[in-house]
Image (cartoon, rainbow, N blue to C red):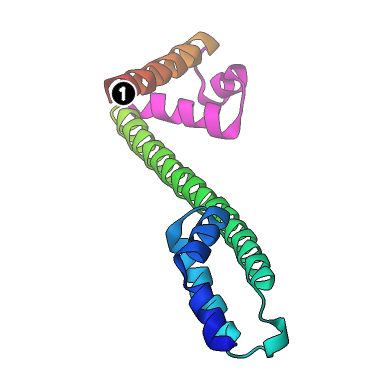
Amino acid sequence: MTHRLIKKLLSVEFKAKAERVMGNLGSADDAIQHLAEKLFLMPDDEKTEAYWLRAIKNAAIDEQRKEAVRDKYEAHAAYLANSQQASAEIHLGDVQDIEVIKKALNSLPVLTRQIFFIYIHKGLSQSVIASQIGISRSSVEKHIAKAREACFCALAKK
């Protein structure tokens, strides 16, 4: 009985049925080969064509589930690769911008740099900076404007 079922399992008609169920010949051939291996391990009373067709359908469902998981994984992997690449490019751009700004600020007079640093990093008001340094508030405002302009011009040239 096993020999007859193997012939039937490997027949063109059964392969055509399996191909219709699986969606392509490659998957159908893989499923048939897997089922033929199982055939030798089963008792003779379970070896019917209906069983094999049901097994092929189950194999098709399994294959579809595997494909769905694989597609989901590949889409997620592609998303991660793109986001990591974009993140790296953004970071590199930020680092380059910082270097451009450093060069622009280093080209300014010392007093302008000091005032700008105090204003930006310490968060002091222009009036407080003016009283600490001993210059007018409008002079502090001009130094800050000069530093900002240098930064913006340097970034625009980049």
Residue highlighted by disc 1? 154
Q: Which span is picked out in magenta?
A: 109-136
- Per the image, label 1 sits on a secondary structure element best described as helix
User: Residue 106's spot in the image, x, y percent?
Assistant: 31, 33
Magenta stretch, main secondary structure, is helix
Amino acid type at mark 1: Ala
Query: Residue at image x 59%, y 83%?
Result: 38
User: Residue 49's spot in the image, x, y percent?
Assistant: 64, 71
Circle 1 Cα neighbour tier, 10 Å, few/some/many (<14 / 14–19 / ≥20): some
Query: Residue at image x 31%, y 28%?
Result: 104
The image shows residue 40, relative to residue 53, as above or below, that is below
Give the farthest residue toward the top: 138
Question: Is 60 part of what is drawn in magenta?
Answer: no
Count of all numbered marks drawn on residues in the image: 1
Which of 89 and 37 lies nearest the eye of the viewer? 37
The image shows residue 58, relative to residue 102, as above or below, that is below
Which of 66 and 82 lies nearest the eye of the viewer? 66
- In the figure, is residue 44 to the left or right of 87? right
Which of 5 and 57 lies nearest the eye of the viewer? 5
